[in-house]
Image (cartoon, rainbow, N blue to C red):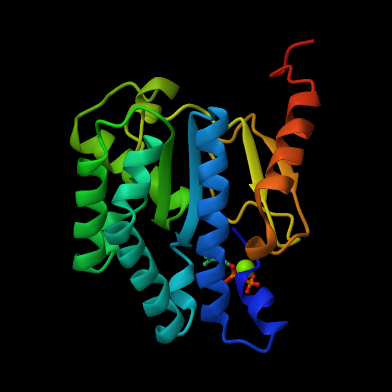
Amino acid sequence: MDGNGRWAQRRNLPRTAGHKEGLNAAKQVVKMAADIGVKCVTLYAFSTENWKRTVEEVGFLMNLVLTHLRGEFAFYKKNGIRIRHIGDIAGLPANVAAEIRRATADTAGFTGLTVTLAVNYGSRNELARAFSKMLNDGVTDCSEDSIQAHLDEPALPDVDLLIRTGGEQRLSNFLLWQAAYAELVFSRTLWPDYGADEFRRTLAEFGARSRRFGGA
Ligand code: IPE
Ligand code: MG
C-alpha cells in the first residue's frame, strides 16, 4: 500500500492525512475482496524499516492500527472477516500488540475472508525468527515444510497475486518466501486513489496470465 505520503503532499496536506485516506482505500479493497470470495488478503501496513520515519509519523501509524482494530469489529463481523497478523509482535508498543491479539482472538471464528495485517513486518526478520524457532524446537531437518511450519502464519497459502501501488517496482522485504511464484502487478496509482475499480481490473489481468510454476 504505497503512495500515501505523496498523495498528501500533492494536496499540501501532512503525510498523516495520506495514511488516513489510505485506510479508507484498504477498507474498500477488503470489502470488495470479501464480496467476491477472495480467501486471503495480506496488507503491508508497517515494515521493520518504517521505524526510520519521524516519531510523529510512526506514532500516527501505530495509533491508526490501534483505533482501526478497536473500531471495526462490527465491519469484520458483518463481512465474516478473520484478522491475522504477521510480523514481530514483540517489537510493537504494548497497547498495539494487545489490540492485535484481541482482534485475532475475537475474529478467529469468522469463516469468510482472512485479512492478515503485516505490522512491524519484514520478510528477513520473519525468516530469521523462523530459523531461531527451529533451533529452539530442536528441528534437525531443514526442509521447506519445516521452514514453512515456523513462519508467523504457517497456514496462509502461497501468494498468488502481489500488488504494489505508488509506482515503485520492488518488493521491499515483503513475503519473500511466500511470493516465490506470485504474479506481480505494479500500479502507478497512489494507494489512497486505489479502489474497487482498479482492483477489479487487476484481478482480471491476473486471471488472464498463464501460470506454469516452472512447468512447460
Ligand atoms: C504508505 O505509503 C506506506 C505505509 C503505510 C508505511 P508511504 O508513506 O510510503 O507513501 P510515499 O511513498 O511516501 O508516498
Ligand atoms: Mg513509500
Residue sitting at 36 percent across and 30 percent down? 154
Is 40 rendered above or below residue 70? Answer: above
Which is more toward the observer, 38 or 46?
38
Residue sitting at 32 percent across and 33 percent down? 150
Query: Percent x, y for residue 126?
Result: 39, 47
* Among the 4 quarters of the image, the one containing residue 161: top right
Task: Report the quarter where the N terminus lies.
Answer: bottom right
Question: Does residue 152 appear anywhere in the picture?
Answer: no
Is 216 rendered above or below residue 63? Answer: above
Indicate which quadrant contains ligand 1.
bottom right
Question: Does residue 26 appear anywhere in the picture?
Answer: yes
The mark tally for this picture is 0
Q: Residue furthest top?
A: 216
Residue sitting at 37 percent across and 51 percent down? 87
Left or right: 98, with 78 as reference point: left
Query: Percent x, y for residue 46?
Result: 45, 62
Task: Report the quarter where the C terminus lies.
Answer: top right
Is 29 rendered above or below residue 200? Answer: below
Residue sitting at 31 percent across and 57 percent down? 69
Query: Percent x, y for residue 196?
Result: 66, 47
Query: Percent x, y for residue 111?
Result: 35, 27
Which is more toward the observer, 30 or 138?
30
* Among the 4 quarters of the image, the one containing residue 32: top right
Q: Residue furthest bottom?
A: 12
Which is more toward the observer, 102 or 52?
102
